[in-house]
Image (spheres, rainbow, N blue to C red):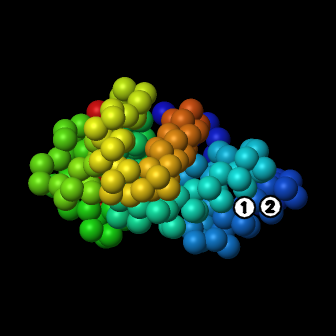
Amino acid sequence: MTDRLRPIPPSEMTEAQRRAAQAVIEGPRGALYGPFVPLLRSPELLENAQRMGEYLRYRSAIGVRLSELAILVTARQWNQGVEWAIHAPIAAQVGVPPDVINAIARRERPEGMLVDESVVHDFCVELHQNKEVSDRTYGEAVALFGEQGVVDLMGLNGYYTFLAMVMNTARTEVPVSSAAPLPK
């Protein structure tokens, strides 16, 4: 499988593409990689997407650990190897247990999750698989995270689904990672 939308050489970028690329590079990501490479073909979309992602990834109301857990569930639901390669090591670093990460990779409900992890996991799985969230799971999420947290959790699922769609269509190359590749 070849990468359909490879990096654009700087000498071939439009001024709008250069500005969009520079905004990503100067932000917390520090480099243009993953989904931002194909998105560079639409600089305004890239600029808006990266701002949303910056909020959701680094400052969401549910915190970085649970955001990373939601990203992993989304990556697994979409078989998205780039998201997995980038975020599985980050999730481990911010406190998501290896057993939880490995179970998600196998499409199993992890055992021994903390209450907040369990609610995030179930919320994300229900949203992806059922295209809705049950009253029970929704109520548990609101009780733990408040309405802003629930909206941010929905946003994380939607944003990383968008990125997964972009990279699956572009066939973005999976980077070298300390994470094991997703099983087929």
Q: Along the line of sight, which residue is nearer the eye, 51 or 30?
A: 51
Percent position of residue 128, x then y? 40, 33
Q: Mark 1 falls on what kind of element?
A: helix
The residue positioned 77% from the left and 50% from the top of the image is 43
Question: 68 or 36, which lies in front?
Answer: 68
Q: Residue under circle 2?
A: 18
Please tell me whether mark 2 sits on a helix, a strand or a loop: helix
Identify the image quadrant of the C terminus.
Answer: top left
Question: Which quadrant of the structure image shows residue 62?
Answer: bottom left
Residue located 55% across and 52% down the image: 34
Residue 38 can be seen, yes or no: yes
Q: In the image, what residue occupies the spot 60% across and 67% down?
A: 31
Note whether 93 is above or below 68 in the view shown. below
Rate crowding at label 2 as few (under 14), some (14 to 19) or many (20 or more) other CA atoms within 10 Å: some
**Residue contact between numbered discs 2 and 1, judged by CB atoms under 8 Å:** yes
Q: Residue at x 19, y 41 (%)?
A: 109
Please name the amino acid that badge 2 sits on: Arg
Indicate left or right for 172 with 11 as reference.
Answer: left
Q: Residues within 10 Å of mark 1 (few under 14, many from 20)?
A: many
Give the labeled residue for mark 1: 21
Q: What amino acid is found at the position of numbered circle 1 in the picture?
A: Ala
Residue extending furthest top? 130
Residue 23, quarter of the rendered image: bottom right
